[in-house]
Amino acid sequence: MRLAGREWRTSVQDVRLGADHHRVIRPARPIAHASLYEGRLGAHLSVDKAAAADLASAWWLAARSPHSLVHLPLRSSTSTCGEEYGPRKLDLVLLHHSLAFPVSRWKEVRAHRSRPAPHKVTLPPAAFPAFDRDAHHRSLHDGFHDHLRWSIAADTLFLVGSRHAYELRADEVRALAEDCSAHLAQAPETHCCAELGLGHWTPGVGERRNPPILLHVQRCNRHR
């Protein structure tokens, strides 16, 4: 599957809570074969071919939509992939850090969404930049702060970061959709995954409150 030119049909819902306005973008159709579970060392996300493409589209959109919450409602999925990591299933929300969205308000936002308006996202060529080894090494230094952060609230995993933070991990997300299909076609039992580190060990109380975890994303075709 090639992602360039892919159309991702979504819905946009506006939420007004007092003086605050929130914009929520969701897939227009349910993501049938994906599941997200809270695990001992982080979180485990299982996706099939179509769900991997949806995740890549959502990832690209979150990096470039600093005023939106990109919501993937995965708890309603009927997929059995990843159930060994249970029992707690989670939704996924991707958002830009400049929103400074308090995740404690998510349950209220989710309950007050407006009627959805159809929207379409088209991925451009070279949507997912690849960084060289030096760029990734720099991200491991203590002085580097442009990491994806995480939080859990209202049965939802939130990933929060800048465009650069999302793009540093984007090629791994792209590979799940574009490269894993060929590997699995040749060897269906191949373990094809991305291991996305969230956070970074640096001194300070704030980091201890939000210690680094791993988001393990695996291609799974069990339903087939």
Image: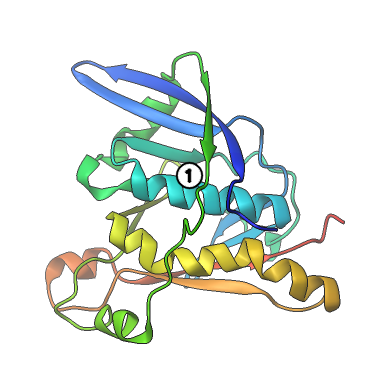
x and y, in percent, of residue 202 in the image: 18, 78
Name which residue type carries label 1.
Asp
x and y, in percent, of residue 79 in the image: 74, 50
Q: Nearer the viewer, residue 41 or 190?
A: 190
How many numbered discs sit on the rendered protein? 1
Other-residue count near label 1 (Cα within 10 Å), few / some / many at <14 / 14–19 / ≥20: some
**At x 55% / y 31%, what residue is drawn?**
10
**Which quadrant of the figure has residue 84?**
bottom right
Q: Is residue 184 left or right of residue 70?
A: right
Please tell me whether residue 93 is drawn above or below residue 138 in the rendered image.
above
**At x 83% / y 71%, what residue is drawn?**
185
Q: Report the quarter where the C terminus lies.
A: bottom right
Q: Which residue is mark 1?
A: 155
**At x 44% / y 40%, what residue is drawn?**
70
Q: Residue furthest front?
A: 125
**Which quadrant of the figure has residue 120?**
top right
Please tell me whether residue 97 is drawn above or below residue 122 in the rendered image.
below
Q: Nearer the viewer, residue 158 or 219?
A: 219
Please tell me whether residue 10 is drawn above or below residue 184 in the rendered image.
above
Instruction: Report helix, strand or loop for mark 1.
Output: loop
Q: Is residue 131 left or right of residue 192?
A: left
